[in-house]
Amino acid sequence: RSQIFDCSGYSTRRRRTNGKLPPKKRHNKLKETKRDPKVSFEEMKRLMRVYGPTKCLRNRTPKDSGKDTKVLSVKRKFYRWFPDFHERFDLQAPGDWYKPRIGHEEEMEYREELRKVDQTLLAAKRNAKKNDRGEPGPQS
């Protein structure tokens, strides 16, 4: 076997296969998804309509959005809006709908507060960007 030293001074042993390292082992374990498939598409749309996002809405949404959106797109958006969904919501058995653990009004207030904080951060970011470009900012 030959020894090769890297820049830190530690030796790295290599096989005698033309100086190449052996191939890495592949792990063929199935990834466990953290998303629970029990949430139906209709329930996702209902929760998004009722509770809304945790971030303030950006000015990027087209006027005709939502008319023919794809199922996977809605699912991605749902898990962005509800990143800790299974910690915050419980399944109500009779109707198969989800209810916030802290209560409806409290969840609405919590999300409204997150949107307000995000709005102030976004406004500060936009103002800083305007000041960097030399544009006059809002007078206060």
Image: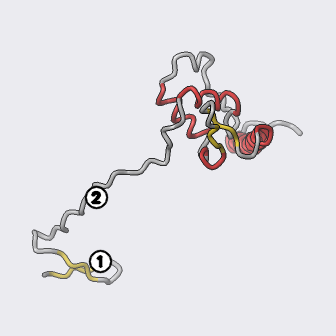
Name the residue at 61% across, 44% down: 85
Name the residue at 57% across, 26% down: 42
Above or below for 27 versus 119 = below
Q: Which residue is the site of mark 1?
A: 6
User: Could you tell me which secondary element the residue under label 1 belongs to?
Assistant: loop
Q: Is residue 127 shown to the viewer in this render?
A: no
Lateral position of residue 56 relative to residue 43, left or right: right
Name the residue at 26% across, 82% down: 11
**60 vs 82, nearest the viewer:** 82
Mark 2, residues whose alpha carbon is within 10 Å: few (<14), some, or many (≥20)? Answer: few
Q: Which residue is the site of mark 2?
A: 27
Q: Is residue 82 shown to the viewer in this render?
A: yes
**70 vs 125, nearest the viewer:** 70
**The quadrant where residue 83 appears:** top right
Give the amino acid at mark 1. Answer: Asp
Of all residues, the one furthest to the left in this rendering is 17
Q: Position of residue 5 (x, y in %)?
A: 26, 80
Mark 2 vs mark 1: give the one in front: 2
Mark 2 to mark 1 CA distance (whole Å): 27 Å
Lateral position of residue 5 relative to residue 102, left or right: left
**The quadrant where residue 44 appears:** top right
**34 vs 76, nearest the viewer:** 34
User: Could you tell me which secondary element the residue under label 2 belongs to?
Assistant: loop
Of all residues, the one furthest to the right in this rendering is 140
